[in-house]
Amino acid sequence: MANIDITRVSSKGQVVIPVNMRKNFKEGDKLVVIQNNNQLIFKKADDFDKNIEEDLEFARRTEEAWKEIESGKGISMSAEEFFKEMKSW
């Protein structure tokens, strides 16, 4: 299930991972950062080879969804419907 939150980039380019998303990370973990157009994907270096195709597909679908929303083609649905739809991806 996707976990969504908002953070900011500091003047030094630093990003804080929101506290509710840190439970699987510990100090000193190495992260791989993948840029896909305007998206950044963070993965633990230990898990880099695992599910990379799934991550890129998720990023592609997210980008498509943002384009639709920005063009006014977004749809409205409940959170339950949204998560059900995401599971089908």
Image (tube, rainbow, N blue to C red):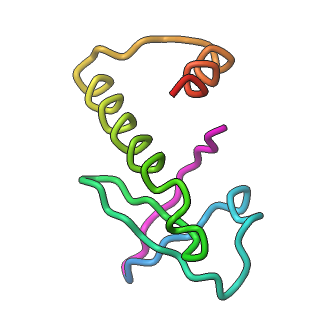
Q: At which x and y percent is residue 42?
A: 49, 64
Magenta stretch containing residue 6, yes or no? yes
Q: Nearer the viewer, residue 2 or 55?
A: 55
Q: Residue at x 39, y 59 (%)?
A: 40
Magenta stretch containing residue 86, yes or no? no
Residue 70 sits in which quadrant?
A: top left
The segment highlighted magenta reads: 1-11
Q: Is residue 69 above or below residue 29?
A: above
Q: At which x and y percent is residue 17?
A: 60, 66
Q: Nearer the viewer, residue 71 or 45?
A: 45
Left or right of 28? Residue 13 is: left
Left or right of 48? Residue 10 is: left
Q: Residue at x 58, y 71 (%)?
A: 44
Q: Residue at x 63, y 19 (%)?
A: 84
Q: At which x and y percent is residue 72?
A: 27, 17
Residue ranking furthest to the right: 23
